[in-house]
Image (cartoon, rainbow, N blue to C red):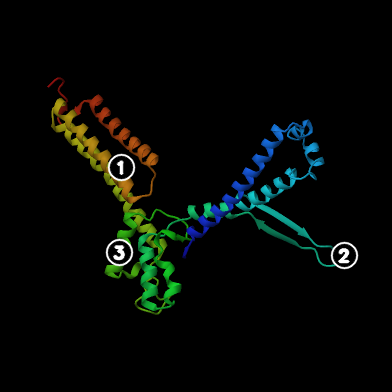
Amino acid sequence: MIYRRFGYIHARLLMHRQDELRELEDTLSDMDKKDAKSADPDRRACLRSRDLDEENRELPGRDRVALLDRIEEKTLKYGKFRFLTLESNFMCEPDYLQHELVGQLLQQAQNLVAMNKPPVRDQLSLRNYIEGRQCLVESEAAFAYHKEDLVSLRPGRDHSFVDAFVERMLRTFHCRLFQETASKSTDPANRYFTRGRINVFVTIIITCIILLLLVIPIWLLYHLSVTLDTNRSNIVCMGVLLVATLAFSAVLSLFTKARRHEILAASAGYCAVLVVFVGNLGDAGIIEGGTRPVGS
């Protein structure tokens, strides 16, 4: 489900429509300036009254209403949606509604830009399939090589480093548990993996990593608090907090598609949990075999 969005064509069309509107805008501005500087009070009054403007539209160079109609038409074609409903004569033929979509150029370009970009591995799979099967002639297969112009119709997911690593391992070791080749193709060169099983497996891996990043620092902090004196323990605990928070942020950045503010909020919450744990240890003052010495 990978296709081109033809960004260059959309850009050229938008530039063309934009320049048409610019030209009409200049014409309207010149007309307004001439009326504002005119010695005729009726012409100056046309800028303040729509009725007077329509009454004088028959004069040469004075049809501002027609100009505004043209501007409206071009504006609707440039960047807005307008639905025209046409109803037939119910006495002559059956009723019907015909919806004509006008002026979707700018909105369509925006929607195409916002669509999901196919991962690099999907682009490579598409090229390998086309080159291996020779299912398209060279001119029609060239779309697969426009990397910056490709979009995917599949719903977006986190497709991060872990997903790519898991799929690479599955292709390397030919794991049949995740394959569904028999139901889609009899060609042994084609291997289709079950996306649902891969997603579950990746979720389990990420969950285990997050648990390890929570359990291991807590165990280290507790072990340090009961084996070192207070001053040394505080310094080492600060180092553990720093390293653990950096590792947590790196995991979020590499293994998910979290945004910067989401990574910042999650890292702050993670660090807060560890700080609260260290504070509770200090308040309890418990060590193995007795009470933490004070001021040692």
Q: Amino acid at mark 3?
A: Arg
Quadrant holding the C terminus: top left
Q: Residue furthest top?
A: 295
CA–CA distance in space, label 3 to label 1: 24 Å
Q: Are marks 2 and 3 in contact (CB under 8 Å)?
A: no
Secondary element at image label 3 = helix
Q: Please, is residue 264 above or below residue 159 in the view?
A: above
| Residue topped by disc 1 | 249
Q: Is residue 278 placed above or below 98 in the rendered structure?
A: above
Q: Which residue is mark 2?
A: 91
Q: Which residue is mark 3?
A: 168
Q: Residue 259 falls in which quadrant of the image?
A: top left
Question: Closer to the N terminus: mark 2 or mark 3?
Answer: 2
Q: Does the image show residue 197?
A: yes
The picture places residue 292, in percent across and down from the top left corner, at 17, 25
Question: Residue 285 appears at what percent x and percent y?
Answer: 21, 25
Query: What's the amino acid at mark 1?
Result: Ser
Residue 287 shows in this picture: no
Q: Residue furthest front?
A: 39
Compare marks 3 and 1 and give the one earlier in the sequence: 3
Say what secondary structure mark 1 lies in. helix
